[in-house]
């Protein structure tokens, strides 16, 4: 959850990093990421049904940088879904429907 300064709290970052997508699925994790992202409606996009293309842009906000660091430290999420990272804080993921 974002604090009064719009930064994610430590418990949320830990939850993102340690989320077990094999047991709990990926959608709950993405909800937590959204809840902890400043300007989530502009920074996060997803499209597709059979394959979901999920993008995360930090917008230069250090709190969003903390969120994406925690997400990228989630071994299974990164291993299964990470597609590419571009300079400037742009992260791209591909989530197959059978893996959700």
Image: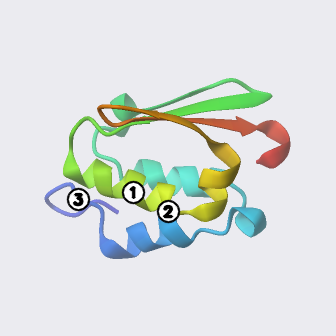
- Crowding at dot 2, Cα within 10 Å, few <14 / some 14-19 / many 20+, comes out as some
Going 80% across and 47% down the picture, which residue do you hit?
A: 99
Q: Residue beneath label 3, please?
A: 7
Please report the residue visible at 68 percent of the width from the left and 31 percent of the height from the top.
52
Q: Are marks 1 and 2 in contact (CB under 8 Å)?
A: yes
Name the residue at 31% across, 40% down.
58
Q: Earlier in the sequence, mark 3 or mark 1?
A: 3
Nearest the eye: 36 or 56: 56
**Residue occupying image coordinates x 49% and y 71%:** 15
Q: Residues within 10 Å of mark 3 (few under 14, many from 20)?
A: some
Q: CA distance from mark 1 to mark 2?
A: 6 Å
Q: Compare residues 50 and 71 and report the one nearer the observer.
A: 71
Residue 39's image quarter? top left
For residue 30, which numbered disc appears in the image?
A: none
**Residue 82 location, x and y as percent?**
60, 43
Dot in front, 2 or 3: 2
The residue carrying pointer 1 sits among few (fewer than 14), some (14 to 19) or many (20 or more) residues within 10 Å by Cα, namely: some
Q: Residue furthest top?
A: 48
* Residue nearest the viewer, comparing 96 with 38: 96
**Coordinates of residue 79 in the picture (x, y in percent):** 66, 53
Give the distance between the C-alpha atoms of the residues marked 3 and 1, in whole angstroms: 14 Å
Where does residue 88 sit, x and y in percent of width and height?
29, 32
Mark 2–mark 3 distance (CA, rounded to whole Å): 18 Å
Question: In the rendered image, which residue does mark 1 sit on?
Answer: 69
Circle 1 SS class? helix
Kindly identify which residue carries mark 2: 73
- Protein image colouring: rainbow
């Amino acid at each position: 959850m974002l604090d009064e300064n719009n930064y994610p709290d430590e418990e949320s970052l830990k939850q993102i990093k340690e989320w077990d997508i094999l047991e709990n699925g990926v959608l709950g994790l993405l909800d937590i990421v959204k809840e902890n992202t400043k300007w989530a409606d502009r920074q996060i996009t997803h499209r597709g049904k059979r394959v979901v293309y999920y993008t995360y842009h930090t917008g230069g906000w250090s709190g969003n940088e903390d969120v994406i660091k925690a997400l990228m430290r989630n071994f299974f999420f990164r291993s299964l879904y990470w597609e590419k990272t571009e300079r400037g804080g742009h992260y791209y993921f591909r989530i197959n429907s059978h893996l959700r």
